[in-house]
Image (cartoon, rainbow, N blue to C red):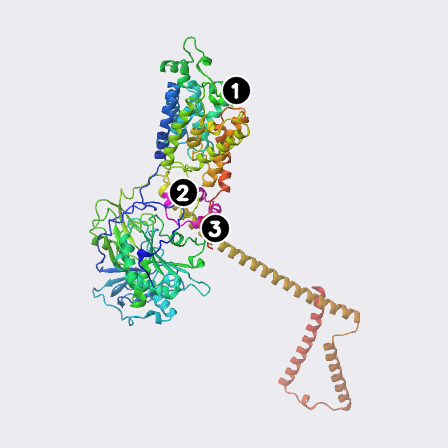
Amino acid sequence: MQFQTLTSPHTERPNSISITMLWVTIALVPGIAAMLWYFGWGILVSILLAVVTAIGCEALAMKLRGRPALPAISDLSAVVTALLFAIAVPPLLPWWLTVLGMAFAILLVKHMYGGIGYNPFNPAMAAYVLLLISYPTDMISWLPPDMLNEHPLTLGQVLSIKFAGIYPQGLGIDALTMATPLDEMRTQLDLNQTLSEIKQSPLWGNFGGRGWECVGNWYLLGGLILLYKRIISWHIPVAMLGAMLVLATFFHVLDQDAFPTGMFHIFTGATLLGAFFIATDPVTASTTKKGQLIYGAGIGAIVYVIRTWGGYPDAVAFAVLLMNLAAPTIDYYTQPQVFGHRSGSNE
Amino acid sequence: MHYPSTNRPARKLHRFHGGLHLPDNKAQSNGRPVEPAALPKQLTIPLQQHIGEVAHPLVSVGDRVLKGQMIARAQGYISAPVHASSSGTVIEIGEQPVPHPSGLSSPCIVIETDGLDEWVELPEPVVHFAQLDPSELRERIRNAGIVGMGGAAFPTSVKVTPGPETWIKTLVLNGAECEPFITCDDMLMREQADRVLAGVAILQHLLEPEQTLIGIEDNKPEAIAAMNAALETGGLSNTEVVPIPTLYPSGGEKQLIRILTGKEVPSHGIPAQIGIVCHNVGTAAAIADAVLENKPLISRYVTIAGEGIKEPRNLEVLIGTPASSLIGQAGGYTDAASKLILGGPMMGFTLHTDNVPITKAANCLLAASEAESPNPGPASPCIRCGQCAAACPARLLPQQMYWYAKAKDLEKAQEYNLFDCIECGCCSHVCPSHIPLVQYFRFAKMESWAREQEKRKSEHARKRHEARVARLERLEAERKARLSKKKAGLKKKTAAKKAGGEAKDPKKAAIEAAMKRAAEKKAKLAEEGVAPKNVEELTEAQQKQIDQADKRRAEAAEDTKQATQEPEDA
């Protein structure tokens, strides 16, 4: 009897890229649902647009590279990139900016470097930064959360705004949108308002902006799912949140009126989404455990510094890209001690 | 001095990094008692069943051999002899298919059995081995051809000879059997605990350890109970059965030592360097046979398992029995059989045919179904998730090693400690991209060895070439020096001659003086009218002889003259 020969191990493999990416997608669902709840249809339209564009670009790139497209699409990595991008951009972002961002992310940031596994930068964040720098007005025009929204939009209105740039009668972009909590906080602090005065505004909830902090909770839940399924390890999120908490608490203690609390920073902006879903992108992050602690802490520190003293209200994308640059070097210097190499371990 | 196991304080166990919880699938094969396998018609006994030098045949085709007779002797220190597993006639000595990952053939002795199973005359059994000199015990172990039966097949005689400088503090018995499906050590400990402990006693006598720890994974409660029961009646001192958590690869030598003692075997080192020696329980049983009964290693327990086998079980198998015959005794293949693996699913290798013999290190024949061992499909790109590093029991970074192995940057791969990889397969198992990581590392190791050898060869050639060039240069220089010395000497002489004017060669002067004297004498005699008697009345022949001599003398004088002038022209 003749048998096929293969190399060991001869076991059923418990993991695959598709399963990993599917779990990331599933873990994003609670946060996305919360965003739909608070920010309306725009999010869903952005997601669908981004996913379709990403898959199309992935297929195109694989075709141009002369490789089979189906395995690349079915690994779901392009879908995850699209989801992360779509929930990071404002719900009313014009359709062509979403398409532009996704095309940039997949074609240039991902496939110009060799496709999945080879891209040094997080594609979703690179696309976000491209748009933020090139189209700042569009990129900071966020809708207010549902409870503060005086002009809830129907799906039809959202579609006409996004695809045709036609706003409902009597309402301009300025009337529909409002500053994000982080933006508001900066503006008020720049006006020399104290924190206690700023907090009087109905914008604020327990820790951060109303609505926003709840979305953060749902991303935290998703993050815990990923931790439980061992898709990610605790190192990067804990280090990132820890670094922000330590820095924020330190300055808050120094001057309680000028520096918001650590909890404000964690529950506002893209902190929780970034900590569990963006910074943990395996391809672009550090891979050693010690390196992941440094990498995560670096992101947390950069986010805090830019938010507090920099030119942008939020900085998760910048921080992630900067630390992406540093990841290979961090990995090189944080190699674990190999079994049997420890000196004096046998005493 | 021993105490009941229940009262013993729990030993502090240590952890190794990573590892995997795998479905152990051991219940398939450990439900039936072990039976001896049927005597096959032919035994194919490979000459190399161990690490080290291949054994040298002692028999020729046509010889009748008896069971237990040594048919090939060890060559060199790290080697092991092989014995006939049954009586019969040698019908062939040559290349035969053997169980090896390469699928290549290797020299074997083929015996046609006669069914008599007639033993060679064995020396008297030894009862009190402790009275024997350790060197004699080692000799018996060596002559019995015992090798590590856990899979590595390193000659045991070398491991029981730790050397004068080494002091063994702990003897570790490996009964972990962490690979899924395999139950041969489990069954051995259940059924032959006394035999294992007899081997342990001999090892204790040889190595004089302070403590002996028998590590068994806790998924084998029957084996643990049997060993403890045997220990209570066996009277071994400072010996303990230690149940360890089931976690692959706790049966790896380095991992087991770490679990039991907390110590790490140094990289590129051996356990003896940290005062530990580790033997498989099967090896201990073989040692007991060799020392107490003088029986060589000619059989072993083999697990036949997998969904591709009708009646999975363990058999006691004569070395050299074809795998196909064992599968027949286990009911044959089911329709599900898709792969035949020698060893376990994690570290074993696939056989393309069952027409290979069982060797000393063969612990399991696994006929796996597609469900048990699915084809992982083509590999995707690495997504750098780091699951491999998290699973690695050697704390390596398989991902980085993979990049460099793939790029054939072997130096860099070695910088990432390629050679500390134990090839356990954990990284490949967890890889979401299904990259055959271990295979890349095997390749990189082989390639490194090959390059190392190549380098050594070319280094050797370079040195030889340099030595040759140097020698030729030296010879040339010496020749030139000799010539110039000679030239200088001659020049000096000529110069002196010129300077001295009349000064003549003393030899020539002497000759001339002698000739002058002779001429004077002749003239004087002529004056006196006396002629030398012997020149008178010469015969024609004598005159001719004299003339020739005169001529030669004249020529010689001429030659000398020329020779003294020649250097001046040169």
Q: Residue at x 68, y 80 (%)?
A: B550
Figure quadrant of the N terminus of chain B? bottom left
Q: Is residue B441 above or below residue B281?
A: above
Residue B316, how many percent across, how many down? 25, 58
User: Of the residues shown, which amino acid type is indicated by label 2?
Assistant: Ala
Any part of residue B296 in sight: no
Residue designated by label 1: A188
Which mark identifies residue B390?
2
Determine whether, in the image, residue A91 is placed left or right of residue B542.
Answer: left
Label 2, secondary structure: give it.
helix
Q: Is residue B339 magenta?
A: no
Label 1, secondary structure: give it.
helix
CA gap, disc 3 and disc 1: 54 Å
User: Of the residues shown, which amino acid type is indicated by label 3?
Assistant: Arg
Q: Which residues are magenta?
A: B399-428
CA gap, disc 1 and disc 2: 46 Å
Nearer to the camera, B335 or B192: B192
Nearer to the camera, B423 or B453: B423
CA gap, disc 2 and disc 3: 18 Å
The image quadrant of residue B531 is bottom right
Packing grade of label 2 (10 A; few <14, some 14-19, many >=20) is many
The image quadrant of residue A51 is top left
Residue reaching furthest to the top: A170
Determine whether, in the image, residue B114 is placed left or right of residue B565.
Answer: left
Residue designated by label 3: A342
Packing grade of label 3 (10 A; few <14, some 14-19, many >=20) is few
Figure quadrant of the C terminus of chain B? bottom right
Determine whether, in the image, residue A98 is placed left or right of residue B57.
Answer: right
Q: Is residue B456 above or below residue A304?
A: below
